[in-house]
Amino acid sequence: MNTQAPATTSVAWPFVPSPRVVDVTHAKGCTLYTRGGGEILDAAGGAIVSNIGHGRAEVGEAMAAAMTSMSYAVPPFLTPERSRLMERLRRYWLPEKLTRTYLASGGSEAVDAACRLAIQHFRAKGNETRWKIISRDISYHGTTFFTLGVAGHVARKKGFEKLIPHMPQVPTPYALRAPGGRHDPDYDIAAAQALEDTILREGPETVAAFLAEPITGSSGGALMPGARYWPKVREICDRYGVLLISDEVMVGFGRTGKRFACEHFGFTPDIMISGKGFAGGYAPIVGVFATDEVVAPLADTGQSLMFYTYGAHPGACAAAEKVLQILEDEGLVARAAAQGAALMERLEALLGQHPNVAEIRGEGLFRGLEIVKDRETLEPFPESAGIANRIVGAGLKRGVFFYGGGTGAVRDIVCLGPAFIVSDSELDRMAETLKAAIDDAVGSAK
């Protein structure tokens, strides 16, 4: 019997072998260093994660102190790290009404928990008819079977359709491709009205929550909702007793130039999820934040929201608390706003009239570009051209990493989300390289 391992042409990582492996050995600030001495300027903060930059020794020291003091404690127990983190969140970060915090290890876990919480809220009140979670047709909320079901991400659902739940979905406010025409001034009102129409069609007594991103993440490429959208959505949810869940996994903790993206639009959700910037990539931690009113029925009936084993890990809590302190002490949320505006100026100057750039959008240091074959008609490139992947590859060849996005239905999205410490010269290079990468990708696709 042949006991030799099968031959392979790739290294053991990633899980699915790839001919293109970026071998990163270490990082500092906004720069990744690769085996062999190469450098990559990270224009995406990884997956829109890094905020204080790489190599902050004080974060590692805080984690080491926590993990040598206590390697693990079940999530319901109180530890010094959890206590300090809760205090900092309450004192500076969370909207006033979001008083309860549940901690998970990743966004998929946290969204799943938030949806469970919404349904459990009604069950604890003796109402078992409200179980539907309405979401939007352009969205990403995770890759568990449930979160795939509530997300509007065609590509990631493919092949799993028989296994995932089918929840009602409503249109995402999408100004560029609004049903009433490009940049229809009432696109935001129309999208909000679609939510009310869907609640009425499904039956308000069956709907537990509406789940959406305040600014659509990489699935849509920083789609902006319009000023009237969220206040009207808040009003609709209140009218029909539907909980409002804001998914800020990507855009929270300063990414858009405010503490949370909901603050741009003047609404407070009943439940909010936020995580990537929570510990800035130093540790896996995501928060589910809720009002007293949401949690009270569980407390009154002696219920709990079941935890995940590694939720609220002491080391991760220590990392998050230290990252939040750095964001505060160094004024990095305000810096994200300022550098975000500076990035937008550079992108508009270089790419605002580019024949293949349909739109540049976003807020703060979260920006998205939609690439098209024809700027005037908005005709996309064929899916087979893989334009976003070509752009990311062309950027890497020039030493800059951009983040591809889209859902399959929405495609050829490129996102930027560098760390808040990004310098002006680094912004210059990002914008210049992105223009060259788009030109390379479009040229090679013809």
Image (tube, rainbow, N blue to C red):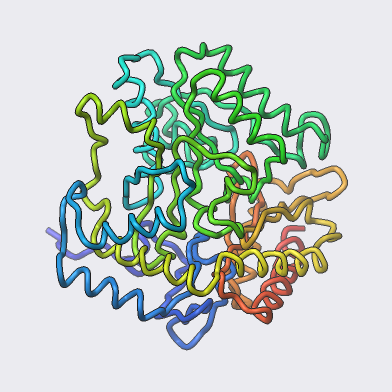
Residue in the picture at 15% in, 55% down = 73
Residue 52 image position (x, y, % from top left)? 48, 71
**Measured from the top left, where is residue 430 in percent x and y?**
67, 73
Measured as percent of width and height from the top left, residue 423 is found at 63, 79
Please give the name of the residue rendered at 49% of the width and 43% of the height, measured from the top-left corner: 247
Q: Is residue 411 left or right of residue 277?
A: right
Question: Of residues 12 and 93, which is closer to you in this image?
Answer: 93
Snapshot quadrant of residue 337: bottom right
Looking at the image, is 347 positioned above or below residue 189? below
Residue 378 vs residue 242, the one in the foreground: 242
Q: 305 above or below 297?
A: below
Residue 228 occupies quadrant: top right
For the N terminus, which image quadrant?
Answer: bottom left
- In percent of width and height, residue 245 lies at 48, 35
As displayed, is residue 74 above or below residue 134? Answer: below
Q: Is residue 9 visible?
A: no
Residue sitting farthest toward the bottom: 37
Name the residue: 52% across, 66% down: 45
Mark count: 0
State left or right for residue 249 relative to residue 353: left
**Residue drawn at point x = 80 percent, y = 44 percent:** 378
Horizontal placement of 222 versus 76: left or right? right
